[in-house]
Image (cartoon, coloured by chain):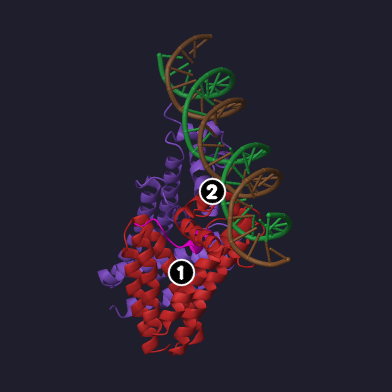
Chain colours: A purple, B red, C green, D brown
Amino acid sequence: MAKSSAPSRERIVAGAADMISRRGLSATSIRDLAKHAKAPLGSTYHYFPEGKQQLVTEAVRYAGGAVARILRAELKAGPVAGVRAFLGLWRGIVVESDFRAGCPVLAVSVEEPPLDEVSPALTAAAEAFEGWERLLAESLREHGVTRDRAEGLAALIVASVEGATAMCRAKRSAQPLDQVAQQLEELIVGAIDRPA
Amino acid sequence: MAKSSAPSRERIVAGAADMISRRGLSATSIRDLAKHAKAPLGSTYHYFPEGKQQLVTEAVRYAGGAVARILRAELKAGPVAGVRAFLGLWRGIVVESDFRAGCPVLAVSVEEPPLDEVSPALTAAAEAFEGWERLLAESLREHGVTRDRAEGLAALIVASVEGATAMCRAKRSAQPLDQVAQQLEELIVGAIDRPA
DNA sequence: ATCTGGATATAACGCTCGTCATAGTCTAGC
DNA sequence: GCTAGACTATGACGAGCGTTATATCCAGAT
């Protein structure tokens, strides 16, 4: 009984993250979501009784966690390698989708919650950003960068990668991500060589 | 005859830019738009016969142009002052809206066009980004930065500001923009002092 | 005073949305 | 086998969407 059909549920969440990263939050309908995941519409409300809000929140957490896992693994080879992998990850997503997909966390962050209460999906987005920043800042500190500068650089890295991803989609070119990659790499190398 | 009721039309475009920057593209309905601009629904299709696509495109151009005008003026005092004003502009929008508004150009960039053709609104977004980058790069070059580095830095500035704006909304805090502002300022000062 | 054309107002079209209710199906545990 | 509960299937609900059509208004040219 507690077995549950896990694959179906995870397929829906992963599909939601992908669809949100392409169309944005409110253009992602539960009907299309179920169809894309080959799950019946009724099942979505069986798995996610709180509706779209719950589904979106889990999708953001799913994407945030998946990226964090990759980032953590790649940072073991140092901040430069980690940031290079971070950029490469998003570059792959953008290019392989023919500039149609981006970051679902960003997509959720730029759509105002209808009510004046803070939506759980937005909170999940903030936590995803914070998780990535924390991993980057910790790696920088381990390589001799002061705390303030490490946190500032981590914020700059996440912000510029998110922005560049969107710019790549608008321009239909990977150039913004490539430019940002080069600037960030030089910056990080400098910060590590002579820690300010 | 050619007089036309310009104020009403411009009010609609400006309102569209604001509403898109808050809710995102597809959550912005023409009905709400007309209501917010105190214009009748029918007038919207009188001024914008091509419908929402035309309205959104003009809103993106409007916002892009307005930011470019401010940026150009502030860059006359040098790249550092210009970037400081650029960051301050977005900081004001985000904070004064209680972290509900962001950048309409970014909002349009992260929503996939339904058809596989390139939407004019997305093209307008790319042009807005390119305009800002060109202004920044030109200012950097005038202060002794090489072309490649100036263009790379300009891309980094625009990308990180856009990303930081979204991060501020998710976190409900101005910290990301402030962190990015500090890192960018140090970076630009360094690039100008000893041009690489 | 009349005419004209831009601007406004109102209603309706077909469609999709999130959500819910209600059955039917299947499988694990006794 | 049988039954309970997780899952599927189907259809409907009110609401909102983009868009169009049509009727009305009203300032300015004749």
Residue at (45% x, 45% y) in the render: A56
Judge by depth and name the residue closer to the eye, A114 or A191.
A114
Task: Residue B106: say if magenta.
Answer: yes
Disc 1 marks a residue whose amino acid type is Ala
Q: Position of residue B154 (x, y in %)?
A: 47, 77
Select label 2 or label 1 by which is in front.
Answer: 2
Please report, as a chain letter, where disc 2 is located.
Answer: B
Residue at (32% x, 68% y) in the render: B178
Q: Is residue C8 above or below residue B58?
A: above
Q: Is residue A137 visible from the viewing direction of this image? A: yes
In the shown orientation, is residue A156 left or right of residue A5? left
Q: Is residue B27 above or below residue B88?
A: above
Numbered mark located on residue A161 in the image:
none
Give yes or no for contact between labels 2 and 1 (Cβ–Cβ under 8 Å). no
Residue at (67% x, 59% y) in the render: B117
User: How many neighbours does mark 2 have within 10 angstroms: few (below 14), some (14-19), or many (20 or more)?
Assistant: some
Looking at the rendered image, the quarter that the C terminus of chain A falls into is: bottom left
**Closer to the N terminus: mark 2 or mark 1?**
2
Numbered mark located on residue B159 in the image:
1
Please report, as a chain letter, where disc 1 is located.
Answer: B
Whole-Å distance between the Cαs marked 2 and 1? 32 Å
Judge by depth and name the residue closer to the eye, B29 or B175.
B29
Q: Is residue A82 visible from the viewing direction of this image? A: no
Q: Is residue A170 above or below residue A192?
A: above
Magenta part of the chain = B98-109
Quadrant of residue A78 within the rendered picture = bottom left
SS of the residue under disc 1: helix
User: How many neighbours does mark 1 have within 10 angstroms: few (below 14), some (14-19), or many (20 or more)?
Assistant: many
**Residue pointed to by mark 2:** B31
SS of the residue under disc 2: helix
